[in-house]
Image (tube, helix red, strand yellow):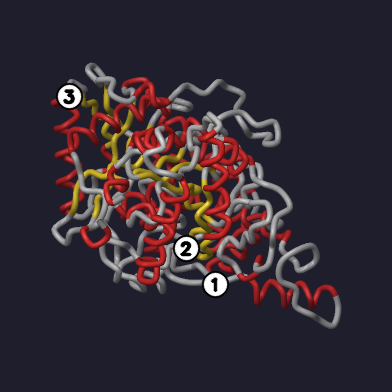
């Protein structure tokens, strides 16, 4: 079974359909790996072993009767932010402890329709607010490449579990880099699709105009397979785009001769680690060798992206998180009256970072400050989107680092929120503009820590990003799994 970790979902599915392996055996294999390794990594908040084996048995029965499905019998890990019928959904927060949704998010329903096996709920920063998974109210997830370091966030559990081979692949969410940054720091592939490409129905909201769901996988091929399943229009989500979805796997293996690749000067400045810069230069050279042409571009409003993002996302978080008041679901503290009950519930239920963002968001939306902050940020957001529109007139895709540094030590930036926020400086503009972006492993630094390359595409052009990422992955052949977990 060891070779399973080096197989794509398509190859594993072939083994299942040929009955050379059963889904129960495959699921047992991953459950055993979780038991063996997750004590060190802490990627899973909850392992749904019994439930997974039941789903695996059903998948085997379906295969036996000639059933099909792109993920039939494939065990996946799920970030604990999607409503999943009958399974506790906490968003790594005490305020949602004990909340068992009565319905499935659209993404979960789509995965079920294709026959996936649900291994368990993956750790995250509370309500997806953070860049290190240190803000979970349950545990701190460690980076499989170095257990003293963070895995990135907020989808740190998803990236760490995928990198250590504790699932075939996983699903995360990306509001300002929360798929791409942990994928980069853990040495795996992570895609943030175009805003509206994947339904957000049943996703517990953080910032509704920024949140997007996407896959975290060990290969670009698996990313394409997962996108085939989760993308598409959903009438239950008013922001869902009613556009047909191509077969993303059809773009694997196509060459990139003549592709115009934009390199934004604003992303290659001081503050980037030397090893990250070196790997970026090497990646650019590789694309040139494959027949692509390199174009210098400018994204002049990049310097305002982090400030703009933290006004918009905190304002939306303040609004979205007002629903957690101890009345309908989750934690309820008793108080002398209803206002006292609200205060005590929210004080006890929310962690420090969530409280910080609620306070910031409430402030920028308050009377007298709305125009000065939120409205102004919305205007700057439009300028950032226009920068990308102009850049795509000269280029087909844009190449940047994912993070200016490799994974930092656990606890290193917890007392400095601004330093933590700046770790998403290269990913945030993509969310503000609603564009698709993918992180692909491009090498290791001198400490043996992964470095990720970001490819940014035009709206709804995930296929071209996958095409370019696959060419890069095939040529570069970066090690995806740390030696200890092979």
Q: Secondary structure at mark 2?
A: strand
- Badge 1 marks a residue whose secondary structure is helix
Question: In the figure, residue 396 lies in which quadrant?
Answer: top left
Q: Is residue 214 above or below residue 86?
A: above
Which residue is rendered at x = 39% and y = 66% of the image? 38
Return the disc, 2 or 3, that comes first in the chain's sequence.
2
Of residues 369 and 119, which is closer to you in this image? 119
Lateral position of residue 131 relative to residue 101, left or right: left
Circle 3: element type: loop
Q: Could you tell me which residue is drawn at 17 percent across and 24 percent down? A: 290
Residue at the far top in the pictured view: 258
Per the image, the residue denoted by label 3 is 290
The reply to whether residue 319 is visible in this rendering is no
Q: Residue at x 28, y 44 (%)?
A: 6
Residue named by callout 2:
44
**Observer able to see residue 475:** yes
Q: Residue at x 73, y 75 (%)?
A: 343
| Alpha-carbon span between mark 1 and mark 2 | 22 Å
């Amino acid at each position: 079974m060891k070779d399973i970790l080096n197989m794509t979902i398509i190859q594993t599915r072939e083994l299942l359909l040929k009955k050379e392996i059963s889904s129960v055996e495959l699921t047992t294999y991953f459950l055993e790996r979780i038991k063996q390794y997750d004590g060190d990594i802490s990627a899973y908040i909850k392992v749904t072993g019994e439930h997974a084996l039941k789903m695996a048995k059903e998948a085997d029965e379906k295969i036996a009767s000639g059933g099909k499905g792109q993920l039939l019998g494939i065990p996946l890990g799920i970030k604990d932010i999607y409503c999943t019928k009958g399974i506790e959904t906490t968003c790594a927060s005490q305020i949602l402890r004990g909340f068992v949704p009565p319905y499935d998010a659209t993404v979960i329903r789509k995965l079920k329709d294709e026959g996936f096996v649900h291994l368990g709920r993956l750790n995250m920063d509370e309500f997806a607010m953070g860049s290190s998974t240190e803000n979970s109210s349950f545990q701190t997830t460690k980076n499989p490449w170095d257990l003293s370091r963070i895995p990135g966030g907020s989808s740190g559990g998803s990236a760490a579990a995928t990198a250590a081979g504790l699932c075939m692949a996983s699903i995360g969410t990306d509001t300002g880099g929360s798929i791409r940054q942990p994928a980069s720091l853990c040495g795996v592939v992570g895609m943030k699709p175009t805003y509206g490409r994947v339904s957000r129905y049943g996703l517990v909201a953080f910032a509704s105009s920024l949140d997007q769901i996407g896959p975290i996988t060990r290969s670009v091929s698996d990313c394409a397979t997962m996108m085939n399943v989760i993308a598409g229009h959903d009438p239950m989500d008013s922001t869902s785009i009613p556009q047909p979805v191509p077969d993303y796997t059809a773009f694997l293996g196509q060459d990139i001769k003549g592709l115009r690749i934009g390199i934004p000067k604003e992303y290659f400045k001081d503050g980037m680690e030397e090893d990250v810069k070196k790997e970026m230069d090497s990646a650019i050279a590789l694309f040139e060798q494959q027949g692509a042409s390199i174009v210098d571009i400018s994204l002049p409003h990049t310097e305002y992206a982090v400030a703009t993002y933290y006004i918009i996302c905190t304002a939306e978080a303040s609004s979205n998180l007002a629903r957690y008041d101890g009345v309908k679901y989750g934690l309820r503290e008793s108080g002398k009256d209803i206002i006292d009950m609200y205060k005590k519930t929210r004080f006890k239920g929310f962690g420090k970072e969530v409280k910080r963002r609620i306070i910031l968001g409430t402030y920028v939306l308050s009377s007298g400050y709305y125009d000065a902050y939120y409205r102004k940020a919305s205007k700057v957001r439009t300028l950032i989107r226009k920068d990308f529109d102009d850049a795509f007139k000269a280029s087909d895709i844009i190449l940047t680092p994912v993070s200016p540094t490799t994974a930092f030590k656990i606890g290193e930036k917890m007392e400095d929120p601004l330093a933590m926020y700046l770790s998403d400086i290269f990913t945030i503009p993509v969310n503000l503009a609603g564009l698709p972006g993918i992180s692909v492993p491009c090498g290791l630094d001198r400490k043996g820590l992964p470095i990720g390359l970001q490819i940014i595409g035009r709206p709804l052009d995930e296929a071209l990003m996958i095409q370019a990422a696959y060419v890069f992955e095939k040529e570069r052949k970066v090690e995806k799994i740390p030696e200890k977990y092979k």
